[in-house]
């Protein structure tokens, strides 16, 4: 017996878990396509600067969680910790900043070195959408509505609440930052060590701290509303109006933040109480400066990402295992005759499998155990008569069917 196990923080997707996983990804892909999003595939690893430049040199992801290494050519590369930076890099690399808007859907593995726990892995998987080009609040509303429709299609929307905030424009954030720093400085003796480090560099991230002492302080911190410019307030009002038109319910949460300068205006999270501590299942916002960070022109953009593993855990029931049609030939002559029938069933889009070995009873037992819905039994006498015995394995009924009618009957 081997002692080899999956690396810590990774897991195999097999059986029911794989069916849940595939259902989430396929559903998201289908709904995003109806909104006009095209799927992009970007590399699993990138130049480290793609992430260190865009996630912030002092962010937890960059300083603690990235899988970075020097390859044999001496280049520093990183397994992608998230999808947005790679999409924006691909936009610039492929000269698409002159062909806007671009509506992008992605799905695939991401990597972060952090403590594994329920619903959180070191290799995890995300779906996401990015709408690059439009700067109007209607774009934000459409991106959020797409996420809401995916949650509804997965039948998990009743367990999820959309929490919405505004980060304002640059002038709003500068004024708010000054007020926030002044308030937090008065309480610096009670702040956690991480928050003390953020106080000068990234004070808005303190609003999102999970430390209990920080949360007590943050509860009475000023909110951004009184510091919003007229333009920022109009943008947020427009977003809320559009969400009402899309019939997307939400609540306001002024503590939702994004810590980097190129994030502005919209920030949102779809959260649930059904997964315990890991409550966020989808999150995103507007990031109008990220494409410029990649060397492109100043370009508005908005998007979200969602963990496939967490969404899979919300599903009440996994999709049923696919049912097959079992071909059960008896003898070499019957086996040769069964192959064209097997391929014809597959060409018609049906799942069909051949029972290879054992006597008739043993083969039928295996077909039942595998969950086949029907068995096509071919013996020497059947071939002489130009028929096969088709047995419904649920009801037990059996009938002789001409060979050229089997596909039509089972379809």
Image (cartoon, rainbow, N blue to C red):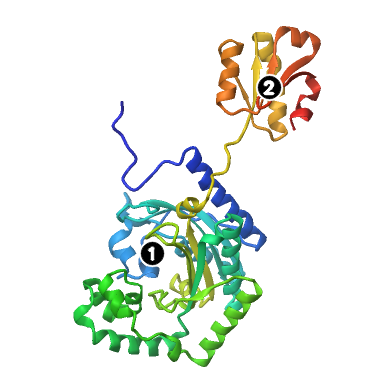
Cβ atoms at labels 1 and 2 below 8 Å apart: no
- Decide which of 12, 171 is in the foreground and name it: 12
State how many labels appear.
Answer: 2
Q: Is residue 380 above or below residue 263?
A: above
In space, the residues marked 1 and 2 are separated at their CA atoms by 60 Å
Q: Which residue is mark 2?
A: 396
**Residue 397's spot in the image, x, y percent?**
72, 21
Q: Which residue is mark 1?
A: 51
Label disc, if present, on residue 376 of the rendered structure: none
- The answer to whether residue 104 is visible is yes
**Residue 309's spot in the image, x, y percent?**
45, 51
Taking the image as shown, residue 208 lies to the left or right of residue 94, namely left
* The image quarter in which residue 194 lies: bottom left
Q: Is residue 185 above or below residue 8?
A: below
| Outermost front residue | 395
Mark sitting earlier along the chain (1/2): 1
Taking the image as shown, residue 304 lies to the left or right of residue 352, namely left
Callout 2: helix, strand or loop?
A: loop
Residue drawn at point x = 23 percent, y = 83 percent: 187
Question: How packed is label 2: few (under 14 Cα within 10 Å), some, or many (20 or more)?
Answer: few
Residue drawn at point x = 61 percent, y = 12 percent: 360
Question: How packed is label 1: few (under 14 Cα within 10 Å), some, or many (20 or more)?
Answer: many
**Residue 361's spot in the image, x, y percent?**
59, 13
Callout 1: helix, strand or loop?
A: helix
Residue drawn at point x = 33 percent, y = 83 percent: 220
Q: Where, quadrant-wise, is the C terminus in this rendering?
A: top right
| Outermost left residue | 189
Q: Is residue 403 above or below residue 64?
A: above
Residue drawn at point x = 51 percent, y = 60 percent: 159
């Amino acid at each position: 017996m081997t002692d080899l196990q999956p690396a810590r923080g990774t897991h195999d997707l097999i059986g029911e878990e794989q069916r849940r996983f595939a259902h989430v990804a396929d559903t998201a892909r289908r709904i995003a396509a109806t909104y006009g999003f095209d799927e992009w595939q970007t590399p699993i690893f990138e130049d480290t600067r793609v992430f260190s430049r865009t996630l912030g040199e002092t962010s937890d992801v960059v300083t603690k969680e990235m899988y970075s290494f020097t390859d044999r050519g001496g280049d520093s590369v990183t397994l992608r910790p998230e999808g947005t930076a790679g999409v924006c890099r691909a936009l610039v690399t492929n000269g698409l900043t002159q062909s806007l808007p671009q509506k992008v859907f992605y799905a695939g593995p991401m990597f972060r070195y952090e403590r594994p726990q329920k619903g959180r892995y070191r290799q995890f998987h995300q779906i996401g959408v990015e709408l690059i080009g439009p700067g109007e609040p209607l774009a934000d509303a459409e991106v959020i509505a797409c996420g809401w429709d995916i949650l509804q299609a997965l039948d998990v929307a009743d367990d999820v609440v959309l929490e919405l905030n505004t980060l304002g424009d640059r002038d709003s954030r500068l004024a708010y930052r000054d007020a926030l720093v002044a308030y937090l400085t008065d309480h610096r003796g009670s702040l956690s060590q991480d928050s003390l480090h953020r106080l000068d560099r990234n004070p808005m991230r303190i609003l999102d701290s999970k430390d209990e002492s920080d949360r007590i302080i943050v509860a009475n911190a000023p909110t951004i509303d009184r510091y919003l410019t007229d333009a920022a307030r109009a943008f947020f009002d427009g977003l809320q109006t559009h969400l009402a038109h899309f019939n997307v319910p939400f609540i306001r949460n002024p503590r939702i933040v994004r810590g980097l300068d190129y994030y502005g205006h919209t920030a949102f999270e779809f959260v649930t109480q059904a997964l315990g501590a890991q409550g966020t299942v989808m999150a995103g916002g507007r990031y109008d400066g990220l494409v410029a960070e990649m060397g492109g022109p100043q370009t508005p953009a908005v998007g979200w990402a969602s963990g496939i593993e967490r969404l899979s855990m919300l599903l009440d029931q996994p999709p049923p295992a696919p049912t097959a049609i079992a071909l059960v030939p008896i003898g070499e002559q019957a086996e040769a005759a069964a192959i064209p029938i097997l391929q014809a069933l597959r060409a018609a889009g049906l799942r069909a499998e051949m029972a290879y070995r054992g006597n008739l009873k043993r083969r039928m037992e295996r077909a039942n155990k595998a969950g086949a819905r029907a068995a096509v039994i071919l013996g020497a006498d059947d071939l002489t008569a130009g028929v096969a015995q088709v047995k419904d394995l649920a009801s037990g009924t059996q009938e002789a069917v001409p060979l050229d009618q089997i596909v039509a009957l089972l379809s």
